[in-house]
Image (tube, rainbow, N blue to C red):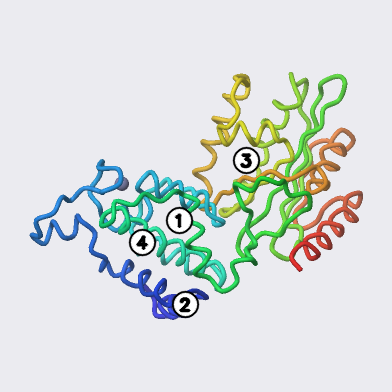
Amino acid sequence: MRPALWLKLWKAEVAPRCCETAWRACLNLLPVRALLHSRGVATDPLCPRCLAAPETHEHALFFCPFIKQVWFASPLGFRLHEECSVQEFFTEFLGAADCNGIGMFFSILYSVWQARNDLLFSAKQSSVDQILLRASSLRPSSNQLTAPHRHGREHVSSWRRPAAGIFKVNFDASLLQSHEAGFGFIARNKEGEVLAAATSTMGPVLSSVLAEALALRWALGLAKELGFRRIWVETDCLVLYNYWERREGGFSHLETVVKDCRLLLCSFDVFTFTFVRRTGNSVADALAKLAFRLGCLVWIEEAPLEVSSLIQDDVFASVASSL
Ligand SMILES: [Zn+2]
């Protein structure tokens, strides 16, 4: 790693022991079982959690199936699909993240490693929530997380800003009596500034839920075309959200579209999907309705005048909710 990145590592806003674990991970110095085994220590090289793969640094910290769930459920929302080395992962993440993001990353990494030791040496199983809770207790300002809480019971009702380096995409679908569908898309950054907006139409669509799924596919395709690599996508359709999270079945006509959407995810390094109430999705909602009048259009770094006051409202709401 470049010297500047090492400096970032040690300056992360997190308990020093988290930085130390991160540093040891980066130099392949943690006593993972595959490493011990290769050095002649009489130990089983397999991961003590899944028993399905050698316990390398990469496997123990990122790619063990259970650990992938931890990263995905975390505020960082990592969807880890490609195997890469710890060093590559660090170089990419440290290069792009701010102090807050790095602190979060290291605290989760430390907590993942501790959970592994608890399992191995005390036969203690930790849940995803327990690991993330321990991680958040290691950070000075854990109440200021800018990313969403994935398993929160109450639903958020106002628009929230993304963390630095993440593009927030809100989308929506609107259905006419004729079943013609209108789609709306708005992408904004940490400051609430518009990166892109778009409208589109499609017709006729069977149900409003299917229209929402088609809008998601359209939004992901657009985000990909625009070159966004780290996105936080938000819907106001609870049925679609629950279906996506596999908490609700029985919508088989969604399956093909949702499968297409999942395929598109390999275009993104960071992907988070959340639900927000309609009040927090008003810009995308207004764009979806405007689509019937405007047709298929894309705006770069601006949005149609009709939604500018709604965009302002979101900025104010996001400031108010972070105070
Ligand atoms: Zn494993």
Q: Secondary structure at mark 4?
A: helix
- List the residue tagged with mark 3: 221
- List the residue tagged with mark 4: 114
| Residue 61 in the image, given as x and y percentages of width and height | 36, 56
Looking at the picture, which amino acid does disc 4 mark? Gln
C-alpha separation, residue under disc 2 versus residue under disc 1: 24 Å
Is the residue indicated by label 3 positioned so its CB lies within 8 Å of ligand 1? Answer: no
Q: Secondary structure at mark 3?
A: helix
Report the side of 285 relative to 150 (left or right): right
| Residue 6 in the image, given as x and y percentages of width and height | 40, 77
C-alpha separation, residue under disc 3 versus residue under disc 2: 34 Å
Report the side of 28 relative to 158 (left or right): left
**What numbered label is drawn on residue 131?**
1
Residue shown at 35%/47% (left/top)? Answer: 64
Q: Secondary structure at mark 2?
A: helix
Residue shown at 52%/46% (left/top)? Answer: 267
Mark 3 / mark 2, whichever is N-terminal: 2
Which label lies toward us, 3 or 2? 2
Q: Are marks 4 and 2 in contact (CB under 8 Å)?
A: no
Which label lies toward us, 3 or 4? 4
Are there few (<14), some (14-19), or many (20+) residues within 10 Å of tag 4?
some
Which label lies toward us, 1 or 3? 1
Vertical arrangement, residue 322 with respect to residue 288, above or below = below
